[in-house]
Amino acid sequence: MKKKVAKFSVLPVVGASIFFYSFSTNKTKDFDAAVLEEFKTVNEELNFDVPHTPDVTVFDPQLRSYPQLGKSYVAFKEAMGFKESGGDYKVINEFGYMGKYQFGRGTLKLIGIKDTNLFLNSPDLQEAAFYANSSRNKWILRKDIAKFQNQVVNGIRITESGILAAAHLAGPGNVKKFLRSNGANSFSDGFGTSIKYYFKKFEGFDTSFVVPDRQAKVNNPSVI
């Protein structure tokens, strides 16, 4: 008796399952066909527009260009770093100038850095030092920037970025002498690099990011 009950109780379940499966399978096929027909692409060109976000890249000595940076402040400082040291944070030249941007000890003290060992071993500190020095020079040369911007001095077009680059090479005092003497009073460093060369090479970058600050310093350099 128990066997018969078990046998007959299974049949409705099996039958219902077969019915449901056949119904759902057919509906699924019909639905899939409808969906495929709606979204089918025939001889259509697929075009996906993805917004371009420039990468922050550094100077590539093989390409010798800044494909992602244009004339931005980052491009300016990377170009400066490559010209000064080939982008080497740990180099010290024969005159004692240090790091990627070739700072002297005197300049470092002016912007609040006394530990040269720490300086050489901290890329972040060197980047902060470059900004602070540019900020200080921009304040010192603010009147000359306003007066000579886009003027031609001794055949050289003067721009703010060129002035800041020349000040990095020769100091703001020598930049003033050059501009105010109409280019007659020039300057070259120990390797013979002329201030005129820096005016030309680094002209036209956007250095508006640099805020002029008379007392620009790297605060708490030990925690940079």
Image (spheres, rainbow, N blue to C red):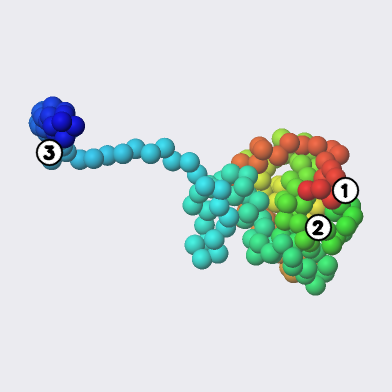
Q: Earlier in the sequence, mark 2 or mark 3?
A: 3
Give the Cα separation between the discs numbered 2 and 3: 63 Å
Q: Which residue is mark 1?
A: 112
161 lies left or right of 97: left
Q: Nearer the viewer, residue 89 or 7?
A: 7
Query: Looking at the picture, how far across and down is residue 149, in whole percent?
Result: 66, 39
Query: Looking at the picture, how far across and down is residue 46, in whole percent?
Result: 23, 40
- Note whether 25 is above or below 199 in the view shown: above
Element at label 2:
helix
Give the Cα separation between the discs numbered 2 and 1: 11 Å
Q: Amino acid at mark 1?
A: Gly
17 lies left or right of 221: left
Q: Nearer the viewer, residue 16 or 135?
A: 16
Q: Nearer the viewer, residue 43 or 6?
A: 6
Q: Nearer the viewer, residue 59 or 116?
A: 116
Give the Cα separation between the discs numbered 1 and 3: 67 Å
- Note whether 11 is above or below 172 in the view shown: above
Element at label 3:
loop
Q: Amino acid at mark 3?
A: Val
Residue 187 visible in the current orientation: no
Q: Which residue is mark 3?
A: 42
- Note whether 222 is above or below 97 in the view shown: above
Q: Which residue is mark 2?
A: 119
Q: Earlier in the sequence, mark 1 or mark 3?
A: 3
> Residue 10 appears in which quarter of the rendering?
top left
